[in-house]
Image (cartoon, helix red, strand yellow):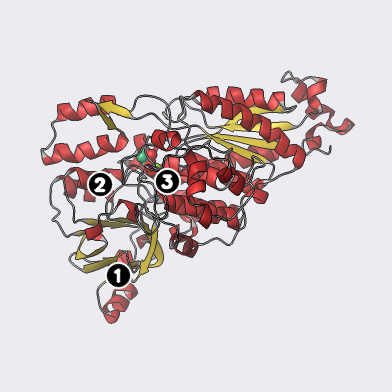
Amino acid sequence: MNMRSDEVKSGYARAPNRSLIRALGITENEMHKPFIGVANSWNDIVPGHINLRLVAGRVREGIAAEGGVPFEFNTIGICDGIAMGHEGMRYSLPSRENIADSVELMIQAHRFDGLVCICTCDKIVPGMLMAAARCNIPAIVITGGNMLPGYHEGCEVSLTDVFEGVGKVAAGSMTEDELFEIECDAMPGCGSCQGLYTANTMACMTEAMGMSLPGCAAIPAVDAAKMRIAYETGRRSVQLVKDDIKPRDIITMQSMRNAVRVDMALGGSTNTVLHLMAIATEAELPFNLEDFNKVGDVVPHICAMQPGGPHSMQTLHRSGGIPAVFKQIERYLEDTMTVSGISVQAIADSVKYLNEAVIKCPDSPEHAGGGLRILKGSLAPSGCVIKCAAVNDDMWRHRGPARVFEGEMDAMDAILAKKISEGDVIVIRYEGPKGGPGMPEMLSPTSALMGLGYTKVALITDGRFSGGTRGPCIGHVAPEAAAGGPIGIVEEGDEIEIDLFERRLDLNISEDEMKSRLDNFRPLKKDLKGVLARYSKMVGQADKGAVTE
Ligand SMILES: CC(C)(O)[C@@H](O)C(=O)O
Ligand SMILES: [Mg+2]
């Protein structure tokens, strides 16, 4: 078999390269086997990542058992939860490009034959998928698994309860001591945060687009099933090399649409909109923002996952996981191939158990429409996104006065100081990809609003949200303020109109007024250094996935 790795190990001219490989302890027998790169984002600071060395051990054993040779290397990984609410959050989205670039650099330099991506948490999963699609060598992903729910006084709690507790303390409805107790109980160990937040949604998207083995996404991190699927993932990676099945054979327009269908059925994180487009861009697919609405129009929201509903990822796993979701929405899916060698339809057909109380039938769904919607209008000419699965019915149409903040921290101060009134539409700008820069996600203000008990306050931003955000929060407004978008010319008290039924977000000022304000608009400039300065220059707008060019 011709191998890509022959470029580093075949012929007399490669004696020096082979000599270095032998220095790793590689035998002559192994020298003739496929070399599999194992990208692992293990680290000591992210709860989602602390188990990944164990996962890697089983992956490596699976690779060796199937006749491959594993070579493990690391990427960085950022915990959005720890980075939340301060300057650190600006570094999270840029880390996605760094991870994609790191994996590309390693697999191109060393001419690996295949790739296993061991990843979890918000930016690492898309970053590695981007690298796989970009380099297009046989590749498979194993996501690291979710954290078990926490329990506080007999009730299930998760990370969002801690975030919303901050607002409750500010409102006086919870004491600081009670919040401390929830803080200690909410996060019981390794794994990605419990609900259908961004990390777990991206794990579901990975499985839905066919890049991980069936059932992988919902298996809890501590479950032995994760170790077993790690071994099978390793074995399968070698088979993919032998059969020459590449990521772009799996990541197609059809499989991207299937991912969106699963996203709509589950009501996933708004961040998937960015990440799926970025992955599609790497795979050179003409997949755009409109595809979300077109696909989402027909697929109902069938599973009430946290934060909009009660179910954790563990519950999704015990209810049948993504294969069971495939089964329930099979009428909407296209039959595509997955890295397992089993097609999506065959995976759906093989489902033996599914809990319909959790993963409902599309004929009696949670909501008739999909969980996410793309809106457009005079305030977001290139689009913006909302998780409508987590919006109360009475806020699907809303008009209110703009309360304008030039950044998240000012808005947070105003919210905690209770300077916001019911009906207000909070506008947080200069938090976009260029302007933030880094498009921070804003779980702190959105959770504070929930914790303070507001039910009729909307929030609009050119930044992002966490998968844990719930309520009428519209993000990714494009173009962003720093790129001259109309969000930059909103004035305090202007009327803003939201219509989720019509998929619109409008600034209710006259066309003349809009034109004159835009003509005179000079976006604010921030004094930036280091990676953020570079990123701000290179990054594109959210409606194209905020990829760097
Ligand atoms: C910390 C969270 C909840 O993981 C957040 O970053 C998300 O996007 O879901
Ligand atoms: Mg996040």
Residue 114, label in figure = none
Q: Residue at x 82, y 28 (%)?
A: 32
Residue 255 image position (x, y, % from top left) = 58, 53
Q: Nearer the viewer, residue 206 or 176?
A: 206
Amino acid type of disc 3? Lys
Residue 365 seen in the current view: yes
Amino acid type of disc 2? Pro
Gap in angstroms between the C-alphas marked 1 and 2: 22 Å
Q: Nearer the viewer, residue 323 or 64?
A: 323
Counting residues from the start of the chain, the first of labels 1 and 3 encountered is: 1
Q: Is residue 212 above or below residue 24?
A: below
Q: Secondary structure at mark 2?
A: helix
Q: Which residue is mark 3?
A: 529
Residue 506, label in figure = 1
Q: Residue at x 72, y 27 (%)?
A: 66
Q: Is residue 269 left or right of residue 112?
A: left
Counting residues from the start of the chain, the first of labels 1 and 2 encountered is: 2
Q: Which quadrant of the rendered structure holds the N terminus?
A: top right
Q: Nearer the viewer, residue 16 or 242?
A: 242
Q: Which residue is mark 2?
A: 445
Quadrant of ligand 1 in image:
top left
Q: Marks 1 and 2: CB-CB under 8 Å? A: no
Q: Which quadrant of the rendered structure holds the C terminus?
A: bottom right
Gap in angstroms between the C-alphas marked 1 and 3: 35 Å
Between label 1 and label 3, give the one nearer the viewer. Answer: 1
Amino acid type of disc 1? Asp
